[in-house]
């Protein structure tokens, strides 16, 4: 064996001096440097754990839905290179790309004026129909990536690009809003080139069921309890589940489906589940906590979800820093992951802004049967159509028509109308025009009349709709009613006095769903037209 105390200079490479596979012993100068090296490595590791980057919404490449015909690799690279300074390059008439794009050149030039912000872009064909909807972190870069030679060659976009004749955009405040708006527009418009998101799949909500003695917390895609406190929609079910597990350690709420009431004596002898043993639930099922104390914890949870999470995150970050300083890296990493999960709670839309009508469940069958009984109809109203008007001070007036089949939204038969014959604010006249155009089209086509048409408004709006079908000399007259927003009064042609129903009646809830969906659909279309008008100006 070689004695390292004699300063023998080994030949290079060092390990060739040792015929065995064992690692060589360190020389004295190596031993002296070991603590310093390990110290620096630990400091680096601690720094990596103790200073987590804030969790951002998924990047475009990560969060693109399966609906989006992603233009990857060289398409993205080409677009990025073109867009780093002034956006997509100018396409001159003599360029090869100018010839390849053909009629899509106008849209390509229009994209150069798009903002460098998040939003949704809508591609249209020669007839003005929206054929593709996509979201973007940077509108100009993302939309511009379609008007490149690589996109024309890519098998996923080569059929789309030649069909494009125009393109518009809707700006959003964040990437999360862009993701939710994209999904909503795809469901409403059903564009030809969007492969996914056309079904009724929805983003999840966090629901706290305040109507119970001991409110439980759950993730849901169906909201049917009007006493609940609702947060969302959230963009990721997995992240939301992880965040709830972290919150349970702090607020110790229940997530089980037990029907626990304060008055029931049997809960005194009930054995709590393992969540109580690991201190993730205060076990109201076993009378381990009073109703008042449990609801106090729930109120703290609601304050946290309503925006009061800053102090909790600061406390967790202090604990993480202390664990990292003490070289307890496993604990520090666990706290880092918990902080990231809690920060994902910001990746959600506003309840009122990002409406998903599919999740506000009613019992369709009972709603239809209740409506048949209320209106004394011989047959159940299987096909219900709703009409609504949208405008801003009489400008850009539009209308929507939605259709419910057996109490469920039937989106392929949704229609938009631009008002042609009415100027200024005159809702009854707009209703008259839309109903006239709708039934004239039904007369000329093969589709049957709806069993019931619901007009958003009061007696004047209903009278205008009835006049429209009378002037078309339709017999017998289709069944029509209207629903006024303020008092939720139902107007019918047969009775002078409006009908008022309890808020929990299935018939009223079905009519509210039709009316609210027509209103939302009209507002969406009006918003698009306003944006287009501002863009053209």
Image (cartoon, grey):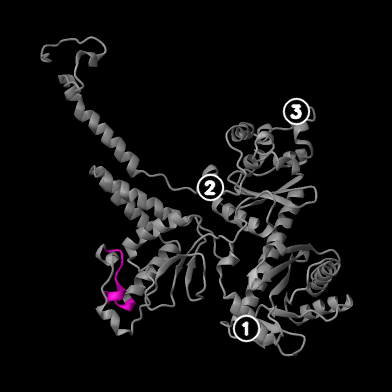
Q: Is residue 315 left or right of residue 408?
A: left
- Magenta stretch holds residue 288: yes
Residue 74: x percent and y percent?
60, 32
- Disc 3/disc 1 C-alpha distance (Å): 64 Å
Q: What residue is disc 1 on?
A: 370
Task: Specify whether residue 487 is in view.
Answer: no
Q: What residue is disc 2 on?
A: 63
Q: Earlier in the sequence, mark 3 or mark 1?
A: 3
Viewer-proximal residue among 506 and 178: 506
Q: Nearer the viewer, mark 1 or mark 2?
A: 1
Magenta stretch: dominant SS? Answer: loop
Residue 220: x percent and y percent?
48, 65
Viewer-proximal residue among 525 and 70: 70
Asked which quadrant contains residue 33, the reply is top left
Residues under numbered marks 3 and 2 in contact, where contact means CB atoms less than 8 Å apart:
no
Q: Is residue 308 left or right of residue 381?
A: left
Q: Is residue 358 left or right of residue 322?
A: right
Residues under numbered marks 1 and 2 in contact, where contact means CB atoms less than 8 Å apart:
no
Task: Specify whether residue 198 is in view.
Answer: yes
Q: Which mark is residue 96?
A: 3
At 78% from the left edge and 31% from the top edge, which residue is drawn? 99
At 75% from the left edge and 62% from the top edge, which residue is drawn? 416
- Magenta stretch holds residue 108: no
Residue 160: x percent and y percent?
70, 43
Neighbor class of circle 2 (other Cα within 10 Å; few <14, some 14-19, many 20+) is some
Q: Secondary structure at mark 2?
A: helix
Q: Where is the N terminus found, in terms of image quarters?
A: top left
Q: What's drawn in magenta, residue-wise?
A: 279-292
Q: Is residue 437 left or right of residue 325?
A: right
Viewer-proximal residue among 46 and 504: 504
Q: Secondary structure at mark 3?
A: helix
Q: Earlier in the sequence, mark 3 or mark 2?
A: 2
């Amino acid at each position: 064996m070689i004695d390292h105390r004699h300063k023998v200079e080994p030949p290079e490479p060092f390990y060739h001096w040792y015929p065995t596979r064992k690692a060589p012993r360190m020389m004295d100068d190596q031993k002296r440097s070991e603590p310093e090296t390990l110290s620096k490595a630990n400091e680096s590791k601690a720094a990596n754990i103790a200073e987590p980057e804030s969790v951002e919404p998924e990047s475009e490449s990560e969060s693109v839905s399966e609906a989006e015909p992603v233009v990857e690799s060289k398409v993205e690279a080409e677009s990025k290179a073109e867009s780093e300074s002034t956006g997509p390059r100018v396409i001159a008439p003599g360029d090869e790309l100018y010839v390849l794009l053909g009629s899509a050149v106008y849209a390509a030039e229009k994209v150069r004026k798009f903002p460098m912000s998040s939003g949704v872009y809508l591609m249209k064909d020669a007839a003005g129909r929206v054929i593709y909807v996509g979201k973007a972190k940077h509108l100009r870069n993302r939309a511009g990536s379609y008007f490149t030679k690589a996109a024309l060659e890519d098998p996923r976009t080569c059929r789309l690009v030649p069909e494009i004749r125009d393109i518009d955009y809707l700006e959003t405040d964040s990437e999360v809003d862009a993701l939710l708006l994209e999904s909503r527009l795809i469901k409403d418009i059903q564009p030809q080139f969007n492969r996914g998101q056309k079904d009724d799949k929805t983003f999840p909500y966090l629901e706290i069921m305040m109507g119970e003695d001991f409110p439980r917390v759950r993730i849901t895609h169906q909201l049917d309890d009007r006493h609940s406190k609702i947060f969302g929609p959230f963009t990721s079910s997995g992240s939301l589940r992880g965040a709830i597990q972290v919150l349970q350690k702090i607020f110790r709420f229940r997530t089980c489906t037990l029907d626990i009431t304060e008055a029931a004596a049997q809960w005194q002898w009930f054995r709590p589940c393992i969540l109580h043993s690991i201190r993730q639930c205060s076990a109201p099922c076993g009378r381990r906590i009073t109703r008042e104390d449990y609801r106090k914890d729930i109120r703290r949870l609601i304050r946290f979800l309503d925006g009061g999470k800053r102090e909790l995150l600061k406390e967790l970050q202090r604990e993480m820093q202390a664990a990292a300083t003490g070289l307890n890296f496993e604990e520090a990493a666990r706290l880092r992951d918990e902080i990231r999960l809690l920060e994902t709670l910001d990746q959600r839309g506003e309840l009122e802004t990002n409406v998903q009508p599919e999740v506000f469940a009613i019992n369709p069958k009972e709603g239809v049967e209740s409506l048949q009984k209320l209106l004394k109809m011989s047959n159940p109203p299987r096909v219900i159509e709703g009409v609504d008007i949208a405008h801003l001070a009489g400008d850009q007036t539009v209308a929507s028509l939605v259709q419910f089949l057996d109490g469920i939204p039937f989106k392929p038969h949704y229609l938009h109308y631009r008002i042609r014959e009415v100027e200024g604010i005159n809702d009854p006249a707009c209703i008259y025009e839309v109903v006239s155009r709708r039934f004239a089209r039904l007369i000329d086509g093969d589709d049957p009349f709806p069993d019931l048409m619901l007009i958003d408004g009061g007696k004047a709006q209903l009278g205008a709709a009835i006049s429209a079908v009378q002037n078309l000399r339709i017999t017998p007259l289709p069944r029509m009613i209207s629903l006024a927003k303020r008092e939720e009064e139902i107007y019918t042609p047969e009775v002078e006095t409006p009908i008022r129903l309890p808020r929990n009646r299935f018939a009223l809830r079905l009519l509210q769903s039709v009316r609210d969906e027509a209103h939302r659909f009209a507002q969406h279309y009006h918003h698009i037209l306003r944006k287009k008008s501002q863009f053209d100006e």
